[in-house]
Image (tube, rainbow, N blue to C red):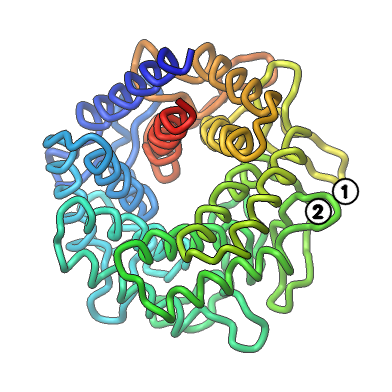
Amino acid sequence: MQKKLIIEFENELKSIFDYWAKYTLDEKNGGFLGALDNKNNIIENAPKGAVLNARILWSFSAAYNFNHEASYLKLAERSFDYLEKHFIDNELGGVYWSVNALGNPLDTKKQIYALSFTMYGLAEYYKASNNQKSLDLAISLFHDIEKYSFDIENGGYLEALTRDWKEITDLRLSDKDANEKKTMNTHLHILEAYTNLYRYWPNAQLKNKIKHLLEIFDKHILDQNTKHLILFFDEKWKSKHNIVSYGHDIEASWLMLEAAEAVGDEKLIHHFEKLAVEIANASLEGIDETGAMIYEFDVDKNHLISEKHWWVQAEAMVGFLNAYQLNKDDKFFNHFLSIWDFTKKHIIDYKNGEWFWGVNKDFSLMEGEDKAGFWKCPYHNSRACIEVINRLKKLN
């Protein structure tokens, strides 16, 4: 069965990148298009986001590092060239949040989430290309985050600043987010980015910062009673909202362990192996009768958002497979299989390519969401394919 699964995920990985190579190149203005709808129609004059472009860079770089397909490296180079030219703020440091369709700065705030993903992509591209400039840029973003975002008094990282690194009133990643100074989401992806950079730049300060982030998750972000992540905080780590994000829970379960393994600390590895299984068990609350993982639960309002988002299924497959590798409990492998089965039936778009944003409780498509766009990218699903293939091969 595992051999059959590996072939399925290899085929899906190719399909994902075939889509991005065929439909998303911006032949008019360079780089990649800002947005496409579900039928692959171009959304004219859509802004281009730093997160989308950084994730494209990571994805094609990771794909090349995985199977050495030359066309993937060319598209990674295209992404790097555009990102460097249009998103890097050469004057004040960091990256712009967005540029317009022509590539001119649009929203120039310094969202630490965007700096992190840019670092994540640049580090992966360095491995693929051996381009020293890519690594140098990644290192400079690390120093920017530490200089301007790190909270010396309370630990952790502040969410966003103005272009010139001053306080900003609107800290939100999107309209869906609370306007708070610290978030689980940004800390998770700083951790992810720092981990990837450390692989190619094993710097002592960076190593200590990874350990600090793991301590922050252990001390403040992970609710030790429920094993769910707390999403929003003030600067002193006071919890501000009681919402469970099942996709982020299961994603964090394996990313935290990955970080502990990267720094090679046996005590941390053992601790986060244990937590990975505990968090995976808690995440099972988000699996409904369809076998897929739902989006979110607002505890205070007792309100369940039962949509099935593409990225949540992708991360759940990796997280449950990771838990199975750790303790060989068949329930985790069975949940991995159920989510993959649901994804094949309801999330993958066999007609127009890529994955749908998601489906509602009645399996109807979520309305008004992009196939490619500011947030819809090849990162979650391509990474899931690569992770699953590698993990299944280890099981073999």
Rendered position, 394 above or below 121: above
> What residue sits 31% from the left and 42% below the top?
59
Q: Position of residue 213 (x, y in %)?
A: 58, 69
Question: Which residue is under mark 1?
Answer: 300
Question: Which picture quadrant has residue 7?
Answer: top left
Q: Position of residue 24 (x, y in %)?
A: 25, 34
* Of the image marks 1 and 2, the number of the one nearer the N terminus: 2
258, 77: nearer the viewer: 258
> What residue sits 73% from the left and 78% below the top?
236
Give the alpha-carbon distance from disc 1 to disc 2, as whole Å.
6 Å
Q: Position of residue 14 (x, y in %)?
A: 28, 24
Question: Pointer 1: residues within 10 angstroms few (<14), some, or many (20+)?
Answer: few
Task: Using residue 318 as the reference point, say whether residue 288 is left or right of it.
Answer: right
For mark 2, give the secondary structure: loop
> What residue sits 85% from the left and 45% below the top?
299
Please identify the quadrant where the C terminus is shown. Answer: top left
Q: Position of residue 282 (x, y in %)?
A: 77, 41
Q: Amino acid at mark 2?
A: Asn
Question: Which picture quadrant has residue 375?
Answer: top left
Rendered position, 192 above or below 7: below
210, 360: nearer the viewer: 210
Question: Pointer 2: residues within 10 angstroms few (<14), some, or many (20+)?
Answer: some
Rendered position, 110 above or below 328: below
Rendered position, 57 above or below 319: below
Question: Which residue is under mark 2?
Answer: 242
Q: Are marks 1 and 2 in contact (CB under 8 Å)?
A: yes
Q: Amino acid at mark 1?
A: Asp
For mark 1, give the secondary structure: loop
